Amino acid sequence: MRLAFFQPDIPQNLGGAVRLGACLRAAIEVIEPCAFPLSDRAVRRAALDYGGKAEVIRRRSWSEFLAAPERAQGRLVLFTTAGATPYADFAFAAGDTLLFGQESAGAPDFVHAAAQAQLIVPLAPGTRSLNVVTTAAMALGEALRQTRGFPSADAAG
């Protein structure tokens, strides 16, 4: 299971995503350009002491992301407020990449077009969206539950 973030806007969110990936053993792909300077040092700093425990892969562009060998391992599953299928009703597979758009603008049409599924997290009426890392944690938790992909308890620590 992988998490991918399309041109992230907020470095602290990327840091939270790296920590999430480290704790649940999910690779993180960052699709550039980002709205902030991105360096390996900046990622480690944003992720606090979890940066060295995470697998973070920088993709210099959308086309590089699409061409990566990991795309052949599963589906590209986009989380979007424009999605029609609630994420808990979707059947995840171990090779899926869970993709999240920019915090400020979501994902552009070409990203929507490339995704094999477009999912939504149902929200209470009158609310607009969740923080991207909150959404990623919910999505990854459900995907790992379905695929029995959580790290084993004896591997913690």
Image (cartoon, rainbow, N blue to C red):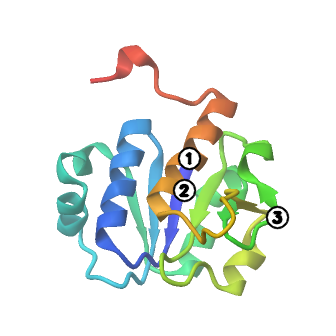
Give the residue drawn at x 67%, y 32%.
147
Q: Is residue 71 left or right of residue 64?
A: right
The percent position of residue 85, horizontal first and vertical second, equals 81, 57
Helix, strand or loop at label 3? It is: loop
Residue 1 appearing in the image: no
Residue corresponding to mark 2: 135
* Residue 16 tag number: none
The amino acid type, in three-letter code, at marker 2 is Thr
Evaluate if marks 2 and 3 touch, with contact meaning CB atoms under 8 Å apart: no
Callout 1: SS:
helix
Residue beneath the point at 69% across and 61% down: 76
Residue type, label 1? Met
Name the residue carrying label 1.
138
Residue 11 in percent (x, y) is at: 30, 71
Residue 55 shown left or right of residue 99 in the figure: left
Q: Earlier in the sequence, mark 2 or mark 3?
A: 3
Query: Looking at the image, do the residues carrying marks 2 and 1 touch, with CB atoms under 8 Å apart?
Result: yes
Separation (CA) of disc 2 from disc 3? 16 Å
Question: Mark 1 or mark 3, which has the lower sequence index?
Answer: 3
Q: Where residue 121 sits in the image (x, y, percent)? A: 67, 57
> In the rendered view of the protein, which quadrant contains the C terminus?
top left
Is the residue marked by circle 3 packed among few (<14), some (14-19), or many (20+) residues within 10 Å? few
Which residue matches tag 3? Answer: 84
